[in-house]
Amino acid sequence: MATETKQVCLYKTSYGSEIVSSYFEESDWIQISEPIEVTFTLLSKETRLLNEISLIENQLTEIQEEALRKMEALKERKQQLLALTHDEEI
């Protein structure tokens, strides 16, 4: 199995949560530990690709659901406006 070694630190975010990340400067994170070297065992290429595909599928579903909600809101508003137009004609 392939491995990758990184320098990581523990940070506190502006939201109060703690996260481990590669050592770098990030303006709204506060470094709360010394950097350490960690060797990760990488997932197989196939697993990484399937994970990325799954992430994209989830994003597409979220976008589609949001678009449908917005379309329904617009249709409802259109019906309200048409009803007002009809009421004024009477």
Image (spheres, rainbow, N blue to C red):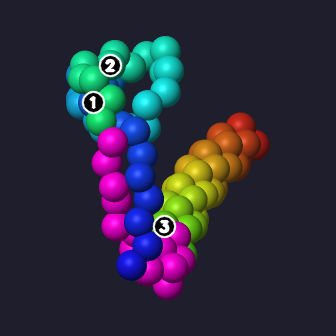
Q: Earlier in the sequence, mark 2 or mark 3?
A: 2
Q: CA distance from mark 1 to mark 2?
A: 6 Å
Q: Residues within 10 Å of mark 3 (few under 14, many from 20)?
A: few
**Residue 72, above or below 78:** below
Q: Nearer the viewer, residue 80 or 61?
A: 61
What span is colored magenta in the figure?
37-52
- The amino acid type, in three-letter code, at marker 1 is Leu
Q: Nearer the viewer, residue 30 or 5?
A: 5
**Residue 72, above or below 34:** below
Image coordinates of residue 84 in percent, x first then y, are 65, 40
Q: CA distance from mark 1 to mark 3?
A: 26 Å
Q: In the figure, residue 89 lies in which quadrant?
A: top right
Residue at far bottom of view? 46
Rendered residue at 43%/31% (across/down)? 23
The label number, if any, that marks residue 31 in the structure image: 2
Q: Are dots 1 and 2 in contact, CB under 8 Å?
A: yes
Nearest to viewer (mark 1 / mark 3): 1
- For the N terminus, give its image quadrant: bottom left
Q: Nearer the viewer, residue 53 or 48?
A: 48
- The amino acid type, in three-letter code, at marker 3 is Leu
**Residue 67, above or below 32:** below
Image coordinates of residue 5 in percent, x first then y, are 41, 52
Q: CA distance from mark 2 to mark 3?
A: 29 Å
- For the C terminus, give its image quadrant: top right
User: Is residue 5 at all visible to an observer of this figure?
Assistant: yes
The label number, if any, that marks residue 55 in the structure image: 3
